Amino acid sequence: MVIRPLAEDVDPEGETIRAGLRDLGYAGVSKVRAGKLIELDIEAASEDDAAALARDMSDRLLANPIIEQFEVTVRENLAKTVIPAKAGIQKP
């Protein structure tokens, strides 16, 4: 899952990073958005089921919907489904 601040909200961490880059001489960076990457190993019957579980986890705990957005990406990893996140609520 990738979790990042909502586009319309101020991103204090991103602004701090942008200012630091500017101080290091990278004047061409005009905007930085900072977020989180969360990788989960989920046992599920299908990729759709794994994605639904990851969305539910994000809605219920991992992301704050008031200030953050998220997206889910599912990929198969050996015998497990690995999930990085997207919005939507489905109860298991």
Image: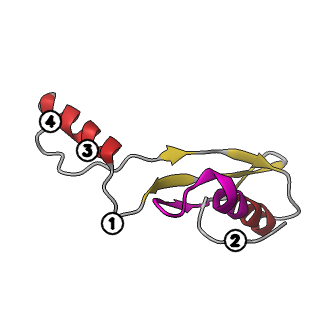
- Between label 4 and label 2, give the one nearer the viewer: 2
Work out how far the residue at label 3 is from the one at label 4, CA to CA, in angstroms: 10 Å
Tell me whether the residue at label 1 lies in contact with that at label 2, contact meaning CB atoms closer than 8 angstroms. no
Residue ranking furthest to the front:
66
Q: Earlier in the sequence, mark 3 or mark 4?
A: 3
Residue 8, magenta (yes or no): no
- Please provide the residue range marked out in magenta: 55-72
Would you name the residue on which mark 2 appears?
A: 89
CA–CA distance between discs 1 and 2?
A: 22 Å
Q: Earlier in the sequence, mark 4 or mark 1?
A: 1
Q: Which mark is residue 15?
A: 3
The figure's colour scheme reads secondary structure
Residue wearing tag 1: 8
In this rendering, the label closer to the viewer, 4 or 1? 1
Q: Residue at x 80, y 45 (%)?
A: 78
Looking at the picture, tell me which residue is in the foreground, 78 or 91. Answer: 91
Which label lies toward us, 3 or 4?
3
Which residue has dot 4 on it? 22
Distance from the alpha carbon under mark 4 to that under mark 1 = 23 Å
First of labels 1, 2 by sequence position: 1
Q: Is residue 32 left or right of residue 5?
A: left
Can residue 84 be spotted in the picture? no
Please, what secondary structure does the residue beneath circle 3 have?
helix
Report the front residue among 15 and 53: 15
Above or below, comparing residue 26 to residue 41 in the picture: above
The residue lying furthest to the right in this view is: 45
Q: Residues within 10 Å of mark 1 (few under 14, many from 20)?
A: few
x, y percentage for residue 48?
76, 69
